[in-house]
Image (cartoon, rainbow, N blue to C red):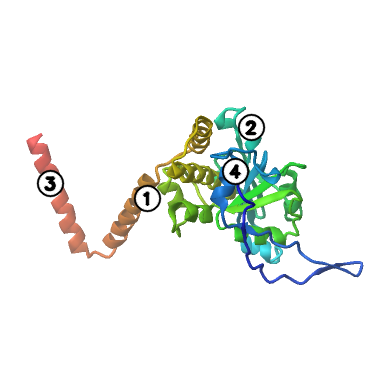
Amino acid sequence: MLIEPSLLKVDPPIAPEPMTKKGIKLMNPAVPCIAKNGLNILHEIFGLGVQTPPTPNLSDVVLIAIDFENINTIKSGFAEKRDCQIGLAILDTKEIHRQAPNTLVSTYNLATGSPFNLRKASEKFIFGETITISTADVAERIQSYIPPARNIVFVGYGIINDLQALQALDFQFPALLSSVLDTSQVANNVFEIWGGSLGDLLLKLSCSFNRLHCAGNDANFTLRALLLLASEGFTRQQRFQTEDCDTLAILRQISHDPIPCWTDPEVAALEKREKRREKSRKHQSKTWSKEKQAEIRAARQLTKERDMAFS
């Protein structure tokens, strides 16, 4: 059996002024610790290479990837702006051998604030319909997606920021919160050194993605990356058993499930560069003199006539 996961202490942010209610000071909930050995925890959760049952708090875990957009707005208590997005991607590990891989992950995108922010969130989210909520309901709505009486593992990319957002919302962390995994730190476990963005990691893992910087999309792709890291990290250890191969195949199928509105990132980057070049040409042409413009038109006409003569 694996030893109890050692946890990396993360210094909590400076706490805001405590709220008061009937003269009693109420402090924001403490930020949970982030696991240092996330790869080992993942292998125990999925039973990879484990001969004995997992420790009780890692049995039948529900993985919940969480992502916030406009975190500073939340930290400020929505003092100036009210625009934010909250993304959740949920995987019940108890079901991975019972259901089809493409049905296992449920993804949600919640949005608050201005009509512009709500429209932008709706247009970018590719895994369903964005849900509009009020700022006062954010913590409660997040809580409503967390199944009671189940072991919970929070997942995020650079998750300390998301934990601080939850703290600012006075979110009550689950009593059965077994661990907190940072996908970027798990990438460090697998690749030894990792300092790239979520998009960089998805490219390295050959995982399709689209429309990042939408909270729901980011949560989904963060979870996909985590599953691929679990698979990649275990594959490098080269100690397979039959049941391990089955589980690894499922993790890869979940992560490589086709996504809506997929665009090849390299193609998108090329198209963006081409648009910039075209825009630059148009801007440049406005600075040409009339003589220069006439010269270019004459050259184009000559080329056109030559082409017609040879056709």
Q: Amino acid at mark 3?
A: Thr
Q: In the figure, 14 relative to 184: above or below?
A: below
Instruction: Point out which mark residue 269 bears.
Output: 1
Q: Amino acid at mark 4?
A: Glu
Of labels 4 and 1, the one closer to you = 4
List x then y, in percent, for residue 259: 50, 37
Are dots 4 and 2 in contact, CB under 8 Å?
Answer: no
Q: Earlier in the sequence, mark 4 or mark 2?
A: 4
Pointer 2: what residue? 95
Query: How many angstroms separate mark 1 from mark 2 (CA)?
Result: 37 Å
Instruction: Point out which mark residue 44 bears.
Output: 4
Residue farthest toward the right in the current orientation of the protein: 22
Q: Earlier in the sequence, mark 4 or mark 1?
A: 4
Q: Could you tell me which residue is drawn at 45 percent across and 44 percent down?
A: 237
Secondary element at image label 3: helix
Query: How many angstroms separate mark 3 from mark 2 (CA)?
Result: 66 Å
Q: Could you tell me which residue is drawn at 13 percent across and 52 percent down?
A: 299
Of labels 3 and 2, the one closer to you = 2
Residue 70 visible here: no
Pointer 3: what residue? 303
Q: Quadrant of residue 167?
A: bottom right
Query: How many angstroms separate mark 3 from mark 1 (CA)?
Result: 32 Å
- Comparing 115 with 177, the one in front is 177
Q: Is residue 297 left or right of residue 224?
A: left
Instruction: Point out which mark residue 188 bears.
Output: none
Q: Is residue 11 left or right of residue 124?
A: right
Q: Earlier in the sequence, mark 3 or mark 4?
A: 4
Q: Amino acid at mark 2?
A: Glu
Of labels 4 and 2, the one closer to you = 4
Q: Could you tell me which residue is drawn at 65 percent across and 55 percent down?
A: 114
